[in-house]
Amino acid sequence: MSTSKSVSEAATPAPTTGPGNFIRDIIVEDLKTSKYDGRVQTRFPPEPNGYLHIGHAKSICLNFGLAADFGGKTNLRFDDTNPEKEEVEYVESIKEDVRWLGFDWEDRLYYASDYFDQLYEWAVQLIKAGKAYVDDLSAEETREYRGTLTKPGKDSPYRNRSVEENLDLFERMRAGEFPDGTRTLRAKIDMASPNLNMRDPVMYRILHAEHHRTGNKWCIYPMYDFAHGESDSIEHITHSICTLEFEDHRPLYNWYVEQLGIFHPQQLEFDRLNLTYTLLSKRKLLQLVKNGNVRGWDDPRMPTISGMRRRGYTPEAIRNFCNAIGVSKTNGIIELAMLEHYLREDLNKRAPRVMAVLRPLKVVIDNYPEGRVEEMDAVNNPEDPGAGTRKVPFSRELYIEQDDFRENPPKQYYRLSPGREVRLRYGYLITCTRVVKDERTGDVLEVHCTYDPATRGGNTPDGRKVKATIHWVSAAEAVNAEVRLYENLFTKENPDEVEEGQDFTANLNPNSLEVIANAKLEPSLAPAAPGSRYQFERLGYFCVDKDSAPGKLVFNRTVPLKDTWAKIEKRETREVSH
Ligand code: ATP
Ligand code: MG
């Protein structure tokens, strides 16, 4: 007998040949022309101001996947230029999540903050070249002077300071002489540029804040645009892949590296992942955590990698999904059902089947000998013959789902009801003879049945048919568990669609979590460890939660069995073929 094994937590290596897309085409072309001496080097550059979400997974799969396909390398770089919102907790979670997804940055773990000295030197170089100046305008004045899409900007009165004065002021900014917000260092480009990013963008701001890595060494911090391309350049990144909202920043990216005369990576933009019923913004996810709308960043309802892992997602399912959605040059919205489709597809292959009853109803088999327990053979995974079988105890008193019995069955209802015979999976055929009710409430307390001893294993020697096969658990041997059922966190496809004066929290689904305190599981699940994934037959895929302990099991429902995406696809192919 082999007992049901849970799915191993160890991630399998990521596939090395990904789908075709325009970025891949560009890389192929660059390799042909030896643009970067045949090198491919990408990076994944998260800001450690929150946990990674499924949108980041798309970027991770793209960056690591492309590099791997061309024998290249991928760096993990923390874009930690904003000391106010960043924390070590986020750094650690990001590393764990990238690793769990199946990717390896080897010895290439970098921090933009490691480059602060170099960035400062480069800023001085630009000042000396007359390409940067210290500005005394307040934040509000800077905004006013910038102009709009239809109105050109105005030069700051401080724009034409001498190089000496700029060098002196910048040095004193660094030395901490000035309070926050009183001065900035700006690139001297063009206040009339049609691209607002080119209207003398801020390079450095004063911020007397402690940084999680550099402590109090700095009180000026570089802005994203100045730090990012320069970090790419320092690391000799060849293809700097980012999302479409940075397309308008590309001229500035190029301007900095060209003015500095340093290694010039190529910025390429792709579409951000958007998912129905899901928010993918660290700021908003942080708000949910802080408000207590969810039980933390790794709440199984969160679209974070850690939440999805806790819910029972596999790295393979996430990678398959990311490969399937591909990348493009226009933003769109992907159906959440498609993500769940890839999850089911993967779990179907690997998750052992077990029997569990979420809402128990007692069944007593009156003609089954009292005290007798039979060990029935159950298949662990019909998709995986190597997974073997296990023994499941059968006895006189069982639990079935309340849903699988109706005292007055509607038409088309073929499960158990008075006088009706059904098959107990891997057990016997039973026929309902009577019910015991609570006299006060009328609720059915017990269902009494008889069994046919000739039908052991669920077979009928006389060939008679029963229309329903239901799952069950032997009452005496059952183990209790708490089971957490999840629905979408938001009720609207677009959670940001709200009435005036409201925010996305108005669209939170009040039924996103339902806790079942006393589910009954087959005894093979008693030692199930956190992270183990199973299919509860007929119910869905479930995963042992980290709150689980021996004798106090807790399961999350990862996803129910019904695949709405497969239906959508079928409908679409039908529509096409008709
Ligand atoms: P958020 O808006 O959630 O805070 P971000 O872009 O500010 O996201 P970063 O930490 O800067 O978060 O992102 C790291 C990388 O992940 C960037 O290259 C970014 O473009 C990419 N990324 C972030 N969100 C998505 C998404 N929804 N789809 C694809 N890539 C994404
Ligand atoms: Mg960002």
Image (cartoon, grey):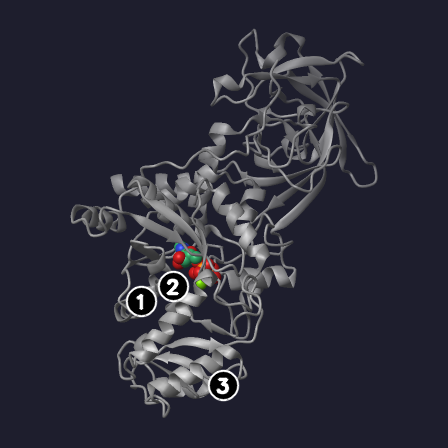
How much space separates mark 2 and mark 1, taking CA atoms? 8 Å
- State whether residue 515 appears in this view: yes
Residues marked 2 and 1 touching at CB (< 8 Å): yes
If you read the primary sequence from the N terminus, does the residue marked by circle 3 or circle 2 appear first? 3
Q: Amino acid at mark 1?
A: Tyr
Residue displayed at 32% across by 68% down: 249
Whether pointer 1 and pointer 3 mark residues with C-beta atoms closer than 8 Å, the reply is no
Which quarter of the rendering shows the C terminus? Answer: top left
Earlier in the chain: of badge 2 and badge 1, it is 2
Q: Quadrant of residue 400?
A: top right
Callout 2: CB less than 8 Å from ligand 1: no
User: Where in the image, quadrant-wise, is ligand 2 located?
Assistant: bottom left
Q: Position of residue 240 (x, y in %)?
A: 32, 56
Label 1 belongs to which residue? 253
Q: Nearer the viewer, residue 356 or 454?
A: 356
**x, y percentage for residue 412?**
54, 31
Give the camera-side residue of 224 and 447: 224
Q: What amino acid type should be assigned to the residue bearing mark 3?
A: Thr
Q: Quarter of the image holding residue 260?
A: bottom left
| Secondary element type, mark 2 | helix
Q: Nearer the viewer, residue 95 or 498?
A: 95
The residue pinned by badge 3 equals 182
Residue topped by disc 2: 228
* Mark 2 residue crowding within 10 angstroms, few (<14) / some (14–19) / many (20+): some
State the residue at coordinates (71%, 16%): 450
From this view, report whether residue 372 is shown above or below residue 121: above
Whole-percent x and y of residue 345?
44, 34
- The residue type indicated by label 2 comes to His
Query: Could you give the CA–CA distance between mark 3 and mark 2, rounded to whole angstroms?
Result: 24 Å
